[in-house]
Image (spheres, coloured by chain):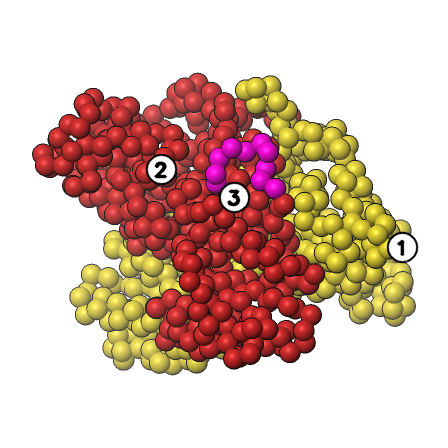
Chain colours: A red, B yellow
Amino acid sequence: MRQSKLFFRTQKEYPKDETSLNARFLIRANFIDKLMAGVYSLLPLGLRVAEKIKKIIREEMNKLPSEELFMPALHPREIWEKTGRWQSMAEVMYQFKDHSRRDLGLGPTHEEIITAIAKKIIFSYKDLPLAVYQIQTKFRDEPRARSGLLRGREFTMKDLYSFHSDQNSLDEYYERAQKAYTAVFKRCGLKTWITEASGGYFSKYSHEFMVELPNGEDEIFLCRLCGFSRNQEIAKFKKDELCPKCRKGVLEKVKAIEVGNIFRLGTRFSEPVGLFYKDQKGKSQPVIMGCYGLGIERTMATIVEVHNDERGIVWPQAVAPFDVHLLLIGESKKTLRAFSEKVYQGLAKASLEVLYDDREGVSAGEKFTDADLIGIPWRLVVSEKTLLNRKVELKKRNEKKTELLTFEQIIKKILPAGRQEKA
Amino acid sequence: MRQSKLFFRTQKEYPKDETSLNARFLIRANFIDKLMAGVYSLLPLGLRVAEKIKKIIREEMNKLPSEELFMPALHPREIWEKTGRWQSMAEVMYQFKDHSRRDLGLGPTHEEIITAIAKKIIFSYKDLPLAVYQIQTKFRDEPRARSGLLRGREFTMKDLYSFHSDQNSLDEYYERAQKAYTAVFKRCGLKTWITEASGGYFSKYSHEFMVELPNGEDEIFLCRLCGFSRNQEIAKFKKDELCPKCRKGVLEKVKAIEVGNIFRLGTRFSEPVGLFYKDQKGKSQPVIMGCYGLGIERTMATIVEVHNDERGIVWPQAVAPFDVHLLLIGESKKTLRAFSEKVYQGLAKASLEVLYDDREGVSAGEKFTDADLIGIPWRLVVSEKTLLNRKVELKKRNEKKTELLTFEQIIKKILPAGRQEKA
């Protein structure tokens, strides 16, 4: 895409009302725009990143298997009364009356809704197990929305719900979900610790997917040797204690940010909402459920918090808004422009996603600064110097060295391995 | 996909609380689920249809060109005050206070928000024209939510906004948007009349995209000869009057449903929100805007209203949840099952999207009834009768005749022309 034609402009300054690194970079680089505390728009570049994250999530969720659906945000009070959560979640739920004085709430989560839908689909043990997920907007009236996209009042969440006839089936699915989550985050460039946290309804522990981060909101204990990890909220470890799991590693206490969490819900929702199935003996039993949450913007923000340097974001290729950033330096020269256009077309033909900085009247320095801020993994420069040899300068965002290469050499170098054949 | 493993079950009865044809079919066929009046979930089959409609929209909008972004639903009162619409739209807007007593509204539309964002991106005539769109959830407190998905309180809308330095540029874009809209609806199986309606802010007329429908909410005059059409709300035509445009055709008054609308906004929003640009002489001018709306669920519902018979929905292939419905009749026979599995795998290999009714203990009659209700364009039956010749029975949903064909013949017949080579 031609940068000159994009609905896009890097901002001159960091936003004054944001302290978090992710919001400062994402706003200045024009990936997002702040409407009010905790509420942001995803601008074209930000949406591109979000869509790449969603695509990875969908691939891994569909494999589990589970199916995608889409539930509404506007909920009637009655369904939340059944589980007692109209009251118990009132602090974080936007609750209001419509013009006919009916009580409505904006869904901070969807256990009640999905359970009510499942009642119309699940009747017998033969219908189980089943699992569904959605990627949908959630609303939470956070008293202090802060940390940029890490804690929003409105945000996109992937929430998966699984339905089982027995504990074994839930446990088996739960374990597969753990692996799928680990895979999602790994593909997004995030190393996660599966951290034991308070269990909630049905089991000793739930599990949080934690990314180590110096300015994370959570504190966790972890053993780098065996991967054991427990949230300090429920842990009573001393400093330098031996890992209770492997008995070899030493526990460290580190700051971290939670990007996903999974719960065994058991019958917490199926019983009050009335989701029962007939077992093999024809006896009515409550369906056993699990739920599995993953925040899209939060994942995006965490990627930024982990992958950056003093000049801007350093996107991992799988979630970068574009594969390549092509910079034309000296756009007023006709021959240069023609060569650059050829490179641009060639990259696009090789199915690479290219952001092409063809802007006129913008200095080389500004283009380089913007490219570093935006953080696309590969930077290509076409200038008078490179044109001399009909070559292009290549630089990785996270490396210092530059190389002068022919177009063919560049394609070979930057096309992701899986796409080499196609080109 | 195997029907036996889907989060899916056709309902035994038509819903008692719905009178509209679209809701009756879509709920019974389990494409959607009703949470409350005007608020529905898209179940896996419904979401598949919605995603196909969105894909068509994205293709046509990107070509215009325009870029996709995503704005929030939660809006602060202040921005709506600037245009006076906090009051003037209060009747359809959900307005409430958060826990800190701040006034919030749920966005019924996004002119205010996009204009405020554009202020940070558009500064000069060189930045224009630009256009952006989103596919996002809207909320409207409809006093009487009715007609199923045709008039929801929460629904998905594609809203596009264009920005121009002069009227000519707007007019030119507006005309291209008209063509893009016509193309979207045509690809969705809908013939639309571009109908003149009240102009609103900046021009004599806005334009509505109307689909003729005996139980439509609107009444329009139209000339079948030249395509002229005007909403009766603003028209004063007599019965059988000559078309004012071509002067040859005779005007008919028909009922219709609006699936899209486009407006020249002019400076209605740019002036109060403060979106100005510097013209070639360095003078500050308000940006001229257009907006272009299209409802996703409404389009889906209209397709159902148009394409159906007494037995169920008849999806046009481009928006069908699947290309093919494969029915195995007599699933207990091992040889039959093996043959059927082979057909299923073969269809999937040819990149066809197959719903495979492999359910056990379900009668042939029930499978046929369900297939008609769901309305996938091609039905394939594998049964003892067809196995005799190692053939499969093929039937189009909208035709009566059945044919016994080999697998190769079937592929040739049902694979959309554009995909023949790939297979």
Tell me the amino acid under the disc marked 1. Lys
Q: Which residues are magenta?
A: A13-22
Nearer to us in this view, A283 or B154: B154
* Magenta region, main secondary structure: loop
Look at the picture and state if B63 lies above or below B414.
above
The amino acid at mark 2 is: Leu
Q: Residue at x 34, y 47 (%)?
A: A190
The type of residue carrying mark 3 is Phe
Q: Work out which quarter of the rendered image holds the N terminus of chain B and state it.
A: bottom left
Q: Left or right: B291 with respect to A20?
A: right
Q: Residue at x 17, y 28 (%)?
A: A240
Mark 3 burial class by Cα count in 10 Å: few <14, some 14-19, many 20+:
many
- Residue at 64% x, 54% y: name it: A7
Decide: is B96 above or below A380. above
State the residue position of label 2. A213
Q: Quadrant of residue A28?
A: top right
Query: Pointer 1: what residue?
Result: B238
Residue for point 66% across, 40% down:
B113
Task: Tell me the element at label 1.
Answer: loop
Q: Which residue is mark 3?
A: A25
Please tell me whether mark 1 or mark 3 is closer to you in this view: 3
